[in-house]
């Protein structure tokens, strides 16, 4: 085991690396699909891995879907069948975090959508707030005095397409009301890339807004935090030395994989180009080396020959 050099994974090396792994963790968007279209050859590659007896798990920072919704998307796009317990989305992992961190009966004030609400309900955490903003009054002066629910012991920030100034006010008020109120974010992705170089602001922007108002740092559930890997490891017997993290993003997928002692594989079907890795490799800054994967492929479809096709 030498330094990570981001070598192309092909031929005999690909066969050996895959033979040495019993678990593969897949990031979703940019690896398995882009938006609603499967990466060409990806369903076949995962089908082969499953047939070879590998355990396949899915780790995604997207808080906009439940575990069950991910199993349905995988099936719809032709991937091998997955059970909800193989899916580690940031909505599920956030619910799990709050379940262990909050006392029974405590509620969460949520900036997020229906998936986040559903995952909280699944673990029995009462919640307020998801969905379109219910304004407590017409003006900020009213928002500052509207009643607060005393059961709220956490503010949870996920992807919220109805994020508003009124919700930000309410989140701040809960955090000020009780210094023990937890502040939790699903992830810090700064942008969600769209086709053709366009992008929309990611959940990291919303987490930052609440952190700035509260002058507190959120606990982040998603990648690169190892909490997400710990969720996988508490559900399955995973040996980091026999686990491959496959992702398209250096500062989330690859950083988490490297810091958890996994073998890391970058795929170029998503947000990262190879010259970004080269810049990290050339840098004198040791911290940047933790963003360098062990291997890369143009697409996970390139694993097919090593899998006997
Ligand atoms: N957050 C949101 C709201 C998203 O829609 C996406 C991708 O679609 C992501 C995060 C990134 O997801 P992943 O970790 O699967 O790349
Ligand atoms: Ca991704």
Image (tube, helix red, strand yellow):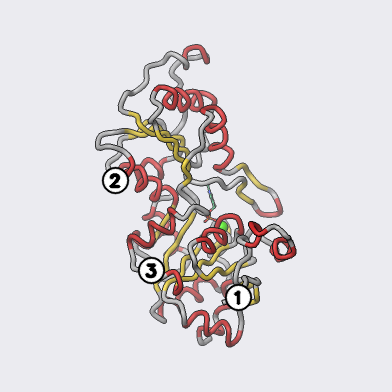
Residue situated in front as seen by the camera: 148 or 175: 175
Neighbor class of circle 2 (other Cα within 10 Å; few <14, some 14-19, many 20+) is: few
As drawn, the label of residue 238 is 3
Residue situated in front as seen by the camera: 115 or 15: 15
Tally of numbered discs: 3
Q: Residue at x 54, y 29 (%)?
A: 215
Q: Please say if the residues under marks 2 and 3 sit with CB atoms less than 8 Å apart.
A: no
Labels 3, 1: front one: 1
Name above or below for residue 186 compared with residue 14.
above
Q: Is residue 8 left or right of residue 154?
A: right
Question: Which numbered disc, 3 or 1, marks the residue that appears first in the sequence?
Answer: 1
Labels 1, 2: front one: 1
Kindly indicate the quadrant of the structure image that contains residue 301.
bottom right
Q: Please say if the residues under marks 1 and 2 sit with CB atoms less than 8 Å apart.
A: no
Q: Position of residue 112 (x, y in %)?
A: 46, 38
Name above or below for residue 179 compared with residue 237.
above
Q: Residue at x 29, y 33 (%)?
A: 106
Residue at the spot of label 2: 123
Residue at the spot of label 1: 2
Labels 2, 3: front one: 3
Q: Position of residue 87 (x, y in %)?
A: 40, 59
Question: Which numbered disc, 2 or 3, marks the residue that appears first in the sequence?
Answer: 2
As drawn, the label of residue 117 is none
Q: Position of residue 227 (x, y in %)?
A: 43, 53
| Quarter of the render that holds ligand 2 | bottom right
- In the structure shown, which secondary structural element does the residue marked by tag 2 occupy? loop
């Amino acid at each position: 085991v030498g330094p990570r050099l981001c070598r192309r994974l092909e031929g005999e090396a690909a066969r050996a690396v895959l033979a040495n792994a019993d678990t593969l963790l897949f990031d979703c968007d940019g690896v398995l699909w882009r938006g609603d279209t499967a990466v060409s050859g990806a369903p076949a590659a995962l089908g082969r891995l499953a047939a070879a007896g590998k355990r396949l798990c899915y780790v995604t920072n997207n808080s906009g879907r439940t575990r069950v919704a991910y199993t349905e998307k995988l099936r719809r796009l032709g991937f091998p069948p997955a059970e909800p317990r193989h899916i580690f989305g940031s909505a599920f992992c956030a619910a799990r975090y709050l379940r262990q961190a909050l006392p029974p009966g405590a509620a969460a004030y949520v900036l997020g959508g229906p998936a986040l609400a559903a995952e909280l309900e699944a673990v029995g955490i009462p919640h307020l707030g998801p969905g379109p903003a219910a304004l407590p009054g017409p003006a900020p002066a009213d928002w500052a005095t509207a009643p607060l629910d005393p059961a709220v012991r956490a503010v949870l920030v996920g992807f919220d397409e109805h994020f508003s100034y009124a919700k930000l006010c309410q989140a701040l008020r809960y955090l000020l009301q009780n210094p023990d109120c937890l502040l939790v974010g699903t992830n810090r992705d700064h942008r969600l890339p769209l086709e053709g170089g366009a992008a929309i602001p990611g959940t990291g922007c919303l987490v930052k807004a609440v952190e700035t108002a509260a002058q507190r740092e959120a606990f982040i559930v998603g990648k690169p935090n190892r909490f997400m890997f710990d969720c996988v490891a508490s559900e399955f017997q995973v040996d980091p030395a026999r686990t491959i993290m496959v992702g398209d993003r250096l500062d989330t997928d690859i950083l988490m994989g490297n810091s958890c002692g996994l073998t890391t594989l970058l795929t170029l079907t998503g947000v990262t180009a190879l010259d970004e890795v080269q810049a990290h490799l050339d840098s004198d800054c040791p911290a940047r080396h933790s963003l360098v994967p062990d291997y890369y492929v143009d697409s996970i479809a390139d694993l097919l020959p090593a899998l006997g096709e």
